[in-house]
Image: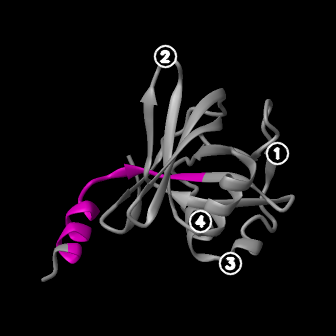
Amino acid sequence: MELADIFRDVMRRYPTGVTVVTSYLEGAPSGLTVNSFTSISIKPPTIGVFITTGSTGYRAIRSTGLYAVNILKHDQDWIAKRFSLDPPGKRFIDLRWFRSRVLGLPVISDSLAYIEAKVVSEIDIADHTLFVGEVVSAEILNDAEPLVYHMRTYKKV
């Protein structure tokens, strides 16, 4: 077995939260499912997301310098699937969303919480780009349980 295959199998055993990272591309809402999201610092509040270099999500964040991280709740696995499998232009069709308070970014209605960020640094690493973001706003939308991804399956905590 190749190292990449073993590594992928090992990482499947590590449970992660599930987010949809959103921005705008050519004036239209854009988003993708991301589990490689992390907090970097509390003072100042700083986050990071790893996005496949050259993807639609990458182009959206790169063109605006802004992104929102929508933290999904336990019953939003259908949203995670939509934003990872559907063509980019169809992901927001019939989806309830609103514009964030400060930056006006797309926020998925009824998600657990969201964070708005301005890109302060980009680092290319292998086939991904780390977008480091200065947090400008964050809001908790409800107190439901989060959605978790483990062993290629969406789960409730």
In-front residue for pair 76/50: 50
Q: Residues within 10 Å of mark 4 (few under 14, many from 20)?
A: few
Q: CA distance from mark 3 to mark 4?
A: 15 Å
Counting from the top left corner in percent of width and height, residue 96 is at 79, 54
Answer above or below: position of 96 versus 142: below
Residue appearing at x 38%, y 63% in the figure: 126
Q: Marks 4 and 2: which is nearer the front?
A: 2
Q: Quadrant of the N terminus?
A: bottom left
Answer above or below: position of 97 versus 58: above
Q: Marks 1 and 2: which is nearer the front?
A: 2
Q: CA distance from mark 1 to mark 2?
A: 28 Å
List the single residue furthest toward the bottom. Answer: 1
Residue 78 is tagged as 4
Q: Secondary structure at mark 2?
A: loop
List the single residue furthest toward the left. Answer: 1
Counting from the top left corner in percent of width and height, residue 74 is at 51, 50
